[in-house]
Image (cartoon, helix red, strand yellow):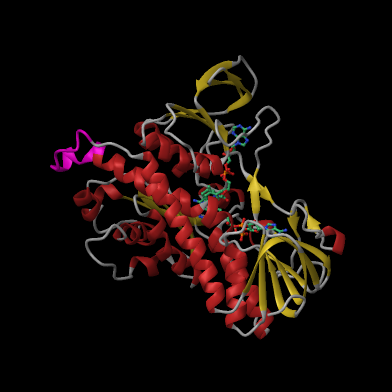
Amino acid sequence: FSAGSEYDLCVIGAGPGGYTGAIKAAQLGLKTVCIDKRGPAGGTCLNVGCIPSKALLQASALYHEAKATFESRGITGTENLKCDFDKMMANKNTAVKKLTGGIEGLFKRDKVKYLKGWGKLTGPNSVTVALNDGGEETITAKNIMLATGSEVIEKLPFVEVDEEQIVSSTGALDLKKVPEKLIVIGGGVIGLELGSVYERLGSKVTVVEFLPTIGGIGIDSELSKEMQKILTKQGISFKMSTKVTAVEKTGGALKVTTEPAAGGGAESLDADVVLVCVGRREFRDGLGAEEVGVELEGRKVKVDDTFKTSVPSIYAIGDIIHGPMLAHKAEDEGAMVAEYLATGKKPHLDYNNVPSVLYTHPEVAWVGKSEEQLKAEGVEYRKGKFSFAANGRSIANMDTDGFVKVLSDKKTDKLLGVHIINAIAGDIISGACIGIEYGAASEDLARVCMAHPTVSEVLKGAAQKTAFGKAVSG
Ligand code: FAD
Ligand code: NAI
């Protein structure tokens, strides 16, 4: 491809949404260019999100498991177990590099032109790229896909994030040492995942959460309460219904002032590191979207059911549009736009069937509606619940925390929601996603032959309770 040539598709942003869309488009025969200002491809997810956080979650979980459970499992000699934090961080960096490099490899394989620089819309079919290496390039394309993702909301008015002592998730994934005392502002997904990492590595972790519940948006309150109990037992302290009103640097330490959310007396806590994780917001800085006529709804880019914006040649996907800010949702949207542009087919995504997973230990995973949502919508439902304490494999694994809850329509038995707490809840939930996608009833799930002995059998047990009122075991 030469500079200034005409493309079929120009994708701005090489995160999970953008890179998936670009690769799929190229595979379907579209001449495609993808632009990202970050440099390494992979977006938030691969560089400072899903992948580095899971690398640290896995390493810290192994360390904690060895320390806390090996002796009771009959494995001795772990008394002097130590955590080489620098090595853990180096392994995390290696995983990130391998994966971001891998995306650039896929770009090459499928002949997606990758440009490292800041893309700005200059018309319905043109983008100017301020190249990271200097200079500018103008791209013209029949269609443009906006996939510019999201950024941390760091601007609590009284907190200045320096990414060293007062950190967002990005700084928390790159600390130089394990803090003695870590205060986490926000008990949502990031707070619980990264709070767990440092608690396992020895930090005294306190989570300050504004709401009375943890786990972020959409979590079923029964799971939220159970997880708070489990994480408290693991050693994380929670200050619920509490707001932070000040974070001050006092010499080397930090002083954090809190107040009850409903008002009341102030309290102060000290910390070495404060992690601010109170949500993310859409990133459109310097994109020029509104200038070329792309309409917004609130902070989100407004799209129709083919992800077309108010400018017919411009599409938008991922964290900048409606729906949950999740990598798998962005990926599916990117691929759908590519397919639509290349073939005219109109694939769709059932937003009720996008799973959420919290990668703590145990994990929390759910798909479909929570009990609170069903009650609010006035839907009558059946509920079956089965505990992992009654599952053979979980007992053999000495890992019995959690349960599966299956919700189905009271009259038709159609699956409405599945909610799981378990060590591998994020994997088990895929079975429920397939059920919901194909319109299964809880009875269908209850009649699927599942391998024994597996932890997934609990999904079947819970479905039996929903469908028949009783399970054979448990
Ligand atoms: P992004 O991944 O944000 O990518 C957008 C890219 O566009 C960026 O690289 C940016 O540099 C680039 N860009 C923006 N503007 C321009 C411009 N004008 N020109 C050029 N380039 C531009 N989700 C999950 O599903 N599972 C998880 O386990 C998970 N863990 C997470 C952990 C953390 C700590 C964080 C912060 C997020 C996590 N997420 C997770 C969320 C996930 O990362 C996002 O939902 C996902 O990355 C969104 O994909 P995207 O393609 O829409 O945007
Ligand atoms: P979040 O929305 O999950 O949680 C933010 C929490 O902060 C909420 O519980 C909220 O009540 C609380 N909060 C807000 N303002 C506060 C204040 N002033 N004081 C105290 N608490 C306050 O947001 P989070 O954790 O920052 O994550 C952002 C997004 O990143 C997630 O919504 C998700 O889309 C994505 N993500 C997904 C992951 C996954 O899928 N496993 C992992 C990490 C992030």
Describe residue 469's horizontal placement relative to residue 31 as left or right. left
Instruction: Please state the horizontal and vertical placement of residue 441, each as a whole percent of the image.
Output: 44, 67
Q: Is residue 358 visible?
A: no
Q: Identify which residue is drawn at 39% across, 32% down.
A: 232
Q: Identify which residue is drawn at 70% across, 76% down.
A: 9
- Please state the extent of the stretch shown in magenta in the rendering: 67-80
Instruction: Please state the horizontal and vertical placement of residue 167, each as a whole percent of the image.
Output: 57, 36
Q: Identify which residue is drawn at 42% across, 59% down.
A: 429
Taking depth in this image into account, of 225 and 96 the one nearest to the observer is 96
Instruction: Please state the horizontal and vertical placement of residue 103, each as a whole percent of the image.
Output: 52, 67
* Residue 358 among those drawn in magenta: no
Describe residue 21's horizontal placement relative to residue 422 as left or right. right
Q: How many marks?
A: 0
Image-quarter location of ligand 1: bottom right
Describe residue 399's horizontal placement relative to residue 115 as left or right. left
Taking depth in this image into account, of 404 and 349 the one nearest to the observer is 349
Q: Is residue 338 visible?
A: yes
